[in-house]
Amino acid sequence: MPFTIATWNINSVRLREPIVARLMSEEAPDILCLQECKCLTEQIPVETFEALGYRYRVARGQKSYNGVAILSKLPMMDAGGHDFAALGHARHVAGRLENGVTVHNFYVPAGGDIPDREENEKFGQKLDFLSEMRDHFRWETPDRSIMVGDLNIAPREDDVWNHKALLKIVSHTPIEIEHLSAAQEAGKWVDITRQDIPEGNLYSWWSYRAADWNGADKGRRLDHIWATPDISSAAHGSRILRDARGWEQPSDHVPVLATFDL
DNA sequence: ATGGTAGGTCTCCTA
């Protein structure tokens, strides 16, 4: 049975309840993974989402910061959440579908502005978080699994608007990309978005600070959908909803979608 | 090289 999964850093699920509902109405992904909900679990406006058919959810919330949720039209069980790097942050939650597929939803730390763990504690925490992701997937090789989220790293040269200009900018430094690759290789994860769209520049985030995000187009692909090899060949039809960056009171991230025939 | 915007909260932190 084919199903579509979407991931979206929503930057306050309460403020952006109307555009979450818009995505649910217009695109109707079977599963919607949100990051940066920025509220306690019980403050997520679930009534609106339930009325649109999203009756199942697993979430890890936190006051003001972080927070991840998986909203699903398909029955889904809570498959846990892990505090990677022991930060005490709500940055991971997992759900299991009736077809045995496990869905991981991650919000990797942004890492601050200075790409040096001596000068900037947050950068070290980001690298440590990625190392623990690697260890987690090395310890138990995942199968029939999909991993999505705001990974806060644009790994490829064509995942940023200017590769050379961003080499020392957090989100595109070689050491971050090495750490992300190690986590990807440990789980044998396939980058589904790039499997479907192998060529050309792709972005899922444009800064709020740009005067003209669309015209300048200084984007980065920070949001990802990965899958294990046993189901990666079932994936097709990946899309990045660039238009959502222009919706009313937008997030700085846009939804990334993929369909799986399983 | 710099500063630009946004959200949550309670005076500034994080992105």
Image: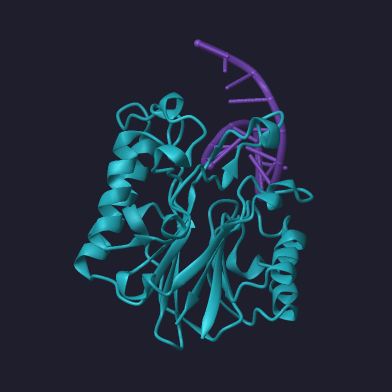
Residue found at x 39% / y 42%: A156
* Position of residue A33 in the picture relative to residue A251 (left or right): left
* Percent position of residue A259, x then y: 52, 71
Kindly tell me whether residue A132 is visible in this rendering: no
State the residue in front, A225 or A251: A225
Q: Residue furthest front?
A: A199
Residue found at x 45% / y 40%: A158
* Percent position of residue A29, x then y: 62, 72
* Percent position of residue A186, x then y: 23, 60
Quarter where residue A153 is shown: top left
Quarter where residue A170 is shown: top left
* Position of residue A43 in the picture relative to residue A169 (left or right): right
Instruction: Give the chain letter for purple.
Output: B
Number of marks drawn: 0
* Position of residue A22 in the picture relative to residue A155 (left or right): right
State the residue in front, A130 or A173: A173
- Up the image or down, A20 lies above or below A154; here it is below
* Position of residue A26 in the picture relative to residue A156 (left or right): right
* Percent position of residue A163, x then y: 43, 30
Kindly tell me whether residue A185 is visible in this rendering: yes
Q: Residue furthest left?
A: A139
Residue found at x 67% / y 35%: A213
Quarter the C terminus of chain A occupies: bottom left
Q: Tell me how the rendering is colored.
A: by chain
Residue found at x 44% / y 43%: A154
Quarter where residue A187 is shown: bottom left
Instruction: Give the chain letter for cyan.
Output: A
